[in-house]
């Protein structure tokens, strides 16, 4: 069954603006990971946030995790046209067994 | 991280034929995974392939349709058998390096399969 659910499904912004994508999940997790996929190619691992962490940064990326609400957000600041891609969240359960992907958010950054 | 390569990167196949996809990793990993991504969809796990044991298939996927080999700790193959147009998807190999205790998973570039 699907664990992560993302919203919005599609997001279109202007270059330089910030993009925020949200992910919700249903069961307890060990960690949550965000990935980027360009034009149906392989997935690029962006960031992993553990269940005992609330926020992580990596360059222009900021990820938050709220385990009480079972949700996470990915913020991309000062977006660029090259950020145009699909973004997926995926959760690993407490047993480390199941790694389940959300439906993804298609981000378009317009020049 | 792990560097993963897949062959072929894409293929166009006829209905009823089979295609074997190869996945090569630059380091030894215990756990390898095969995913399918249908057009416009998210990723769905097909099976987990651990070296030295039979692959474990997820609900909806069977060995006869998707046989998997895992001959060593750096290599795996997935075969898509008796293909139909519904098998047109991107197939992705993924690994979970043993050194990453928090279970980061890394993905190959994918194999884009079109079945006519």
Image (cartoon, rainbow, N blue to C red):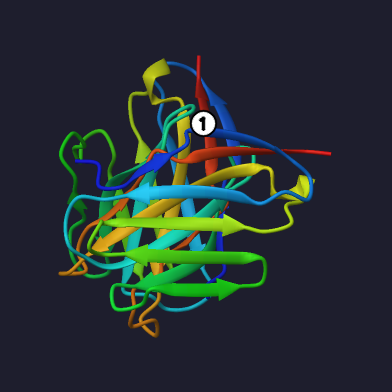
Give the letter of the chain under mark 1.
B
Residue at x 48% of width, y 52% of height: B22
Count of numbered marks:
1
Q: In front here: B80 or A108? A: A108
Residue drawn where x is 18% and y is 58% of the image: B54
Q: Where residue A61 appears, x then y in whole percent?
A: 60, 65
A35 sits to left or right of A82: left
* Residue B81 % position (x, y): 33, 31
**Residue A97 seen in the current view:** yes
Out of A95 and B95, give the one closest to the viewer: A95
Q: How many neighbours does mark 1 have within 10 angstroms: few (below 14), some (14-19), or many (20 or more)?
A: many
On the image, which quarter does residue B37 sit in?
top left
Q: What residue is disc 1 on?
A: B113
- Note whether A87 is above or below B14 in the view shown: below
SS at badge 1 = strand
Rendered view: B115 above or below B1? above
**Residue A48 relative to residue B61: left or right:** right
Name which quarter of the figure residue B100 lies in. Answer: bottom left
Residue ID at (18%, 65%): B53
* Residue B84 visible in the current orientation: no
**Residue A57 locus on image (x, y percent):** 56, 74
> Residue A14, percent across and down?
76, 40
Is B2 drawn above or below residue A103 in the view shown?
A: below
Whether residue A7 is situated above or below residue A24 in the rendered picture = above
Position of A81 compared to A100: left or right? right
């Amino acid at each position: 069954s699907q664990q992560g659910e993302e919203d919005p499904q599609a997001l279109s912004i202007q270059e330089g603006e910030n993009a925020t994508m949200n992910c919700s999940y249903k069961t307890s997790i060990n960690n949550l990971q965000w990935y980027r996929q360009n034009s149906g190619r392989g997935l690029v691992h962006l960031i992993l946030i553990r269940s005992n962490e609330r926020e992580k940064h990596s360059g222009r990326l900021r990820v938050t995790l709220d385990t009480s609400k079972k949700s996470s957000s990915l913020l991309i600041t000062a977006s660029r046209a090259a950020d145009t891609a699909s973004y997926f969240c995926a959760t690993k359960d407490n047993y480390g067994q199941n790694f389940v992907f959300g439906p993804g958010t298609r981000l378009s950054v317009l020049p | 991280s792990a560097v993963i390569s897949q062959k072929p990167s894409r293929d166009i196949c006829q209905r009823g034929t089979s295609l074997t996809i190869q996945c090569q990793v630059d380091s030894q990993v215990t756990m390898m995974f095969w995913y399918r991504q249908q057009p416009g969809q998210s990723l769905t796990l097909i099976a987990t392939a651990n070296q030295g044991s039979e692959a474990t298939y997820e609900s909806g996927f069977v060995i006869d349709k998707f046989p998997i080999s895992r001959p060593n700790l750096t290599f795996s193959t997935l075969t898509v058998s008796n293909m139909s147009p519904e098998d047109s998807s991107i197939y992705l190999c993924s690994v979970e390096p043993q050194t990453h205790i928090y279970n980061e998973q890394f993905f190959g570039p994918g194999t884009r399969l079109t079945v006519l």
